[in-house]
Amino acid sequence: MEIIPKAKRVIDTYNSLRGQRGTWESHWQDVADYMLPRKADITQKRSKGDKRHEQIFDGTATHALELLAASLHGMLTSTTSAWFSLKYRNEMVDQDDSASEWLEDCNKVMLQAFSRSNFQQEIFELYHDLIAFGTAGMFIQSDEDDDLRFKTIHISELFISENQKGLVDTVIRKFILKARSLPAMFPKAELPHDIMEQVRNNPQDDVVILHAVMPNEMGGIYENNVNKPYSSCYVHEDTGFLLSESGFNDFPYVVPRYLKASNEIYGRSPAMNALPDVKMLNTMAKVSIKAAQKQIDPPLMVPDDGFVLPVRTVPGGLNFYRSGTRERIEPLNIGSNQPLGLQMEEQRRKAIRENFFVDQLLSVQGSNMTATEVMQKQEEKMRILGPVLGRLQSELLQPLITRCFNILLKQKKFQEVPEFLANQVIEIEYVSPIAKAQKSGDLSSIMRGIEVFGAIQQVSPVFDYLDVDGLVAHLKDVIGLPAKILRSRAEVEQMREQKQAQAEQMQQMQQEMQMAEAAGKAAPAIKAVADE
């Protein structure tokens, strides 16, 4: 069968990316074996449902990885509160009531779509991959029932490439289907005779499929579903047959890296940093278990004669020996130093916990701590993961929110866009707990400044230097207050004008009353003068 150029391009790209990824696979397999065994299917293919904890003798690393994944989930994409909001780049437009109301409605629709879809369980899986392997991938597509559909891709299926900006713009996913699923998944494809024979005769056979999403080489104006900025091709690997061809207006994958060297494509993770300590701890735990077994059930020293073998060590066992001999069965003293072994193991556990920030994430709060001290502890906890936030915002959160916004906009889930908002740039503001913690320093400085100004105000009017409107706007951004609980600047100006008008009216009425009162007092005096 002749392979068409588009399918050949996919296969050639896949072979090139597979060669570049080869050195990472053994590293990922080691990490998965010791810290994420349920995903240890990279270089070793195992049966589904089999036991995968044979190499783990101490669960410290496994528990630490779970804790860090759960912490990232709660601090970046919380299930209990909004973790992002939308605003306009143009500040004048952002202050317009109708524009803000439309954008708030979009924000509400997006959060509802996230809650209704499978986003929470899939993003939690992505955090596990990110912390274990340093690289994770998620595919985002529209869904007829839930509007959005997410799928976290197993690291063994993911092959990526970067553009000149260091952003992932090419993803090839290698996955397996049952042969009988091909006609249903690709109903428009005219399957060749060889594939149809396999579907009919061996429907349960595994079929390897390559799904490639990469920049479209066509360029120019994108008029149809195929000619779009990103091409999407499904290829049957064995035959090179092009099963399906389409395109995307924006990149449908998000591929974050936890940490990344400038000359590498795939990321590195806390689990990779902890891997030497994890291997050492498991070896030490294995030796300690053997030493404990020897102490609890030690080898026995038995005289060469005088006893009737075998030696029975079970409870209630009887051992026969010759009468009159003084020789006895004695345990062999191996001279092990169990406390030293436990101390060395605890040192390795501490190093592993430090790699995963366990001590900071589970900091003990004393009973005598004040509310301010507890808040400061929480802020310190959030700041520890702050350096990771920048990369996750640019490679995970921003493309994820942008992709979902475009899908919902295409589905017409938002209200009709006002005409004056045409060509306005919308920006993303992160209001997750970890993002708020990054701004907590500004809030502390502001509160401290107000306290100092209040003390000086008794001597000099220093509050005249404060721009109250600017202060309120800045506090709104720092604290993350929703716009619906604050009045717009136009409403505030109108209220101020009304109050000023009322004050002027009251002042005028008081002046008129004072003049009338003065006139009333003057009238008797004039009369008295006239009588004289």
Image: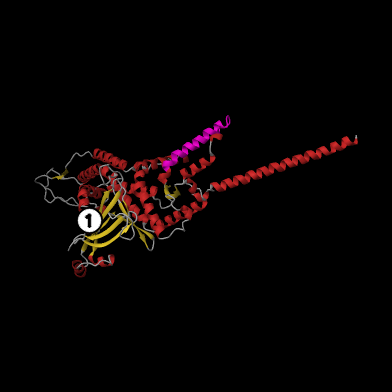
Q: Is residue 522 magenta?
A: no
Q: Is residue 288 above or below residue 233?
A: above
Residue 47 appears in the picture as rendered: no
Q: Residue 186 appears at what percent x and percent y?
A: 27, 65
> Left of 328 or right of it: where is 363?
right
Give the farthest residue toward the right. Answer: 532
Q: Main secondary structure of the magenta part?
A: helix
Please report the bounds of the magenta region as a residue range. Answer: 437-462
Residue assigned mark 1: 9
Taking the spot 77% from the left edge, 41% from the top edge, the residue there is: 516
Taking depth in this image into account, of 529 and 384 the one nearest to the observer is 529
In the picture, the quarter occupied by the N terminus is bottom left
Q: Is residue 443 magenta?
A: yes
Check disc 1 and report its element: helix, strand or loop.
helix
Residue 298 appears in the picture as rendered: yes
Q: Residue 333 appears at what percent x and percent y?
A: 18, 40
Within 10 Å of disc 1 (Cα), the crowding (few <14, some 14-19, many 20+) is few
Q: Residue 356 appears at what percent x and percent y?
A: 32, 43
Q: Residue 22 appears at what percent x and percent y?
A: 20, 49
Taking depth in this image into account, of 449 and 365 the one nearest to the observer is 449
Taking depth in this image into account, of 519 and 119 the one nearest to the observer is 519
Q: Amino acid at mark 1?
A: Arg
Q: Is residue 280 above or below residue 238?
A: above
Taking the spot 44% from the left edge, 58% from the top edge, the residue there is: 414
